[in-house]
Image (cartoon, rainbow, N blue to C red):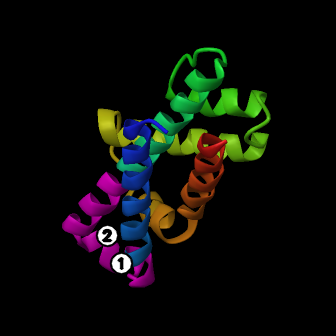
Amino acid sequence: MAPDILARIAKLEKVLKKLERLRQRNISEQEFLKDDDLQDIVERNLEVAVEALINIANHIIGKKRYRKPENAADTFQILTEEGILEKDFSHKLQGWVGLRNVIVHIYAEINLSLLYKALMNEQDDLRKAAKILCGEVEK
C-alpha cells in the first residue's frame, strides 16, 4: 500500500478517536454553543476526517480506474455506481462533503447546533465510511 494512503488512513483514525473522546465527554449543547475553542476543535477534526475520506475514495477510484469525479461529493457517487457504497449512505457522505465545504471555503456561517449534532449523533457515519473504504483499499 502506498505510504501516502497509509498516512491518510492513520490521520483519519487519529481524528475519529479525538472526536469520539469529545463525544464521550457528554457536553451539553448549551456548553458547546458557549465554547469557541471546542467548536474550533470539532470543526477542524470533522474537516480533516471528511478530507481523508475523500482522499481515500479518490485513491480507490484511481487504482480501480473508475470514472474521474467531477467534484469531491462525486467521489462517493462513483463508489455507489461501482457497488462499494449503498445509495442512501453515499448521500449521507455527500452531505458531510457539503459541511466540509462550508468549513473550508467559508461559504456561510456554520450552524453550530448542526455541528453539535454531527459530533454527538452522526459521526458514526464517518467511522462506517472509514471501515468500508479502508477495507476496499486493502483488497
The vertical placement of 23 against 135, above or below, is below
Q: Nearer the viewer, residue 33 or 96?
A: 96
Q: Nearer the viewer, residue 139 or 55?
A: 139
Residue 66 image offset from top left, x and y in percent: 66, 19
Give me the residue at 43% from left, 39% from top.
Answer: 5
Q: Residue at label 1?
A: 30
Locate residue 128: give its quadrant: bottom right
**Would residue 73 appear left or right of 109 to someone viewing this image?**
right
Check if mark 2's residue and mark 1's residue have beta carbons within 8 Å.
yes
What SS does tag 1 mark? helix
- As measured in the structure, the alpha-carbon distance from the residue carrying label 2 to the one carrying label 1 is 5 Å
**Would residue 90 appear left or right of 126 to someone viewing this image?**
right
Q: Residues within 10 Å of mark 2 (few under 14, many from 20)?
A: some
Give me the residue at 68% from left, 26% from top.
Answer: 78
State yes or no: residue 36 in magenta: yes
Q: Residues within 10 Å of mark 1 (few under 14, many from 20)?
A: few
Principal SS element in the magenta part?
A: helix
State yes or no: residue 80 in magenta: no
Q: On residue 33, which mark appears?
A: 2
Q: Which residues are magenta?
A: 22-46
Locate residue 125: give its quadrant: bottom right
Residue 69 image offset from top left, x and y in percent: 57, 19
The vertical placement of 60 against 123, above or below, is above
Tell me how many marks there are: 2
**Residue 72 visible in the shown view:** yes
In what quadrant of the picture does the C terminus appear? top right
Residue type beneath disc 2 = Leu
Residue 34 image offset from top left, x and y in percent: 25, 72
